[in-house]
Image (tube, rainbow, N blue to C red):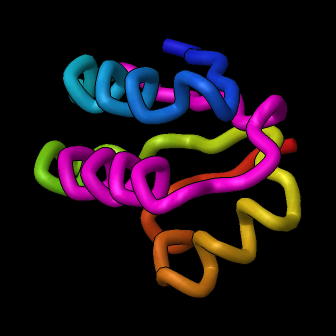
Amino acid sequence: MTVETTDRNIVTTIRDAAKNLGAGTETILDLSSVERLDASGLQALEDLAAAAGQQSVKPTLRGANIAVYKVLKLTKLTQRFSFVD
């Protein structure tokens, strides 16, 4: 399942993706339209990572810009996601 998100709907999109996680399905979040992460977006990604960990899956983040990647790196979330361009 590939889900595209923007700055406006990032929290809702990530929460929906977390609900639809499952073994045998690949979850890809397209962040190419996301310019930056605020606290609520970061929390949603942390929740997604936790839900994925419980189900032994690793979501993929596509198109994360350098600012978003740096925030994920500082919060030690990069190891809980796969990244593609």
Q: In the image, is 79 to the left or to the right of 16?
A: right
The quarter of the picture where residue 5 lies is top right
15 horizontally vs 83: left or right = left
Residue range in magenta is 25-52
- Residue 36 in percent (x, y) is at 73, 53
Quarter of the image holding residue 2? top right
Tell me which corner region of the image, top left, top right, bottom left or bottom right, holds residue 30: top right
Q: Residue at x 57, y 42 (%)?
A: 60
Residue at the limit of the structure toward the left, as seen here: 54
Q: Residue 12, percent across and down?
A: 39, 24
75 w.r.t. 17: above or below? below
Residue at point 49%, 81% (across, down): 75
Q: Quadrant of the C terminus?
A: top right
Q: Is residue 54 above or below residue 73?
A: above
Q: Tag count in the figure?
A: 0
Residue 51 belongs to the span the image colors magenta: yes
Q: Nearer the viewer, residue 1 or 14?
A: 14
> Which percent across, then down, holds residue 18?
28, 31
Q: Residue at x 59, y 30 (%)?
A: 29
Residue 68 painted magenta: no
| Residue in the picture at 56% in, 70% down | 78
